[in-house]
Amino acid sequence: MKMILMSLILLCGLAAFAQTKPLYENNFEQAAAGKLPDDMMVIGGEFNVAADGTNKVLELPGAPLDSFAVLFGPTETADVVVSARILGTAKGRRAPTFGVGLGGVGGFKLQMSPGKKALELLKDQEVKASVAFDWKSATWTQLRLQVRKLKDGEWMAEGKAWPQGSAEPKEWTVSIADKEEPVSGRASVLGSPFAGTPVWFDDLVVEKVTGNKP
């Protein structure tokens, strides 16, 4: 009987581990410098792995000055969350925009827009919600975006951002409710190097949402 109980406990523990394991994660430490990982798909831009001292990052070069993205992870519709660390550098009055996305090219995006001093939530290319954000140049910023189903015919997209080294906000800082079922697609990171300086991405993670994930 004791052996049976121990086996059940072990199985429950393994099941819990399987449920919490990310759908995708990449810190680029095992990636070859100067190349794009094979599991990623570029939507414009010359994304490549670059060395940052002893660390490796995904780099979007400072030119050309346009908007670019790269897709990664499995194809999902809802009840999913993506996070990444992103670093951009201003030059004079110019600053890059950057963010994370869910649902492929036409899905939801959480975008840092330093020129507007704002954190924006977009659906496709349209800004749906915006909050003030005091972004700091040349520092890592953590971004997290989730899309979840509330009930039949209603979904919620929620985002937050915070500087590396500070505590993660307990509440989502920008959100929108939507009546349309989200577009099915892969997660993404995106950037527009308007300052002519590279944008760096690191610690990409895609997870399933369990309940109202904080």
Image (spheres, rainbow, N blue to C red):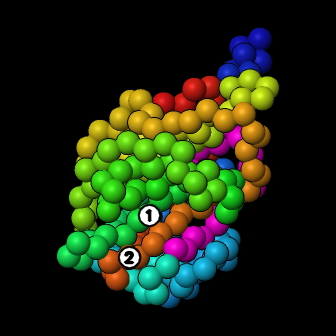
Label 1: how many residues lie within 10 Å, few (<14), some (14-19) or many (20+)? many
Q: Residue at x 55, y 74 (%)?
A: 68
Residue 167 position in % (x across, y down)? 29, 39
Q: Secondary structure at mark 2?
A: loop
Q: Is residue 81 magenta?
A: yes
Residue 186 placement: quadrant = bottom right
Which label is found at residue 30? Answer: none
Question: From what the image shows, is residue 93 above or below residue 45?
Answer: above
Horizontal side, residue 27 vs residue 52: left or right: right
Please name the residue that numbered disc 2 is placed on. Answer: 194
Amino acid under label 1? Answer: Phe
State whether the magenta stretch is mostly helix, strand or loop. strand
User: Is residue 43 shown above or below 122?
Assistant: below
Image: magenta residue range: 67-83
Marks 2 and 1, how far apart at CA: 10 Å
Relative depth, front residue between 39 and 96: 96
Residue 55 located left or right of residue 181: left
Residue 208, visible in the rendered structure = no
- Label 2 vs 1, first from the N-terminus: 1
Residue 18 appears at what percent x and percent y? 68, 39
Q: Secondary structure at mark 1?
A: strand
On the image, the x and y values in percent for residue 169 come to: 35, 35
Q: Residue at coordinates 77% horizontally, 40% vertically from top-left? A: 181
User: Taking 190 as reference, is 166 left or right?
Assistant: left
Residue holding disc 1 = 98
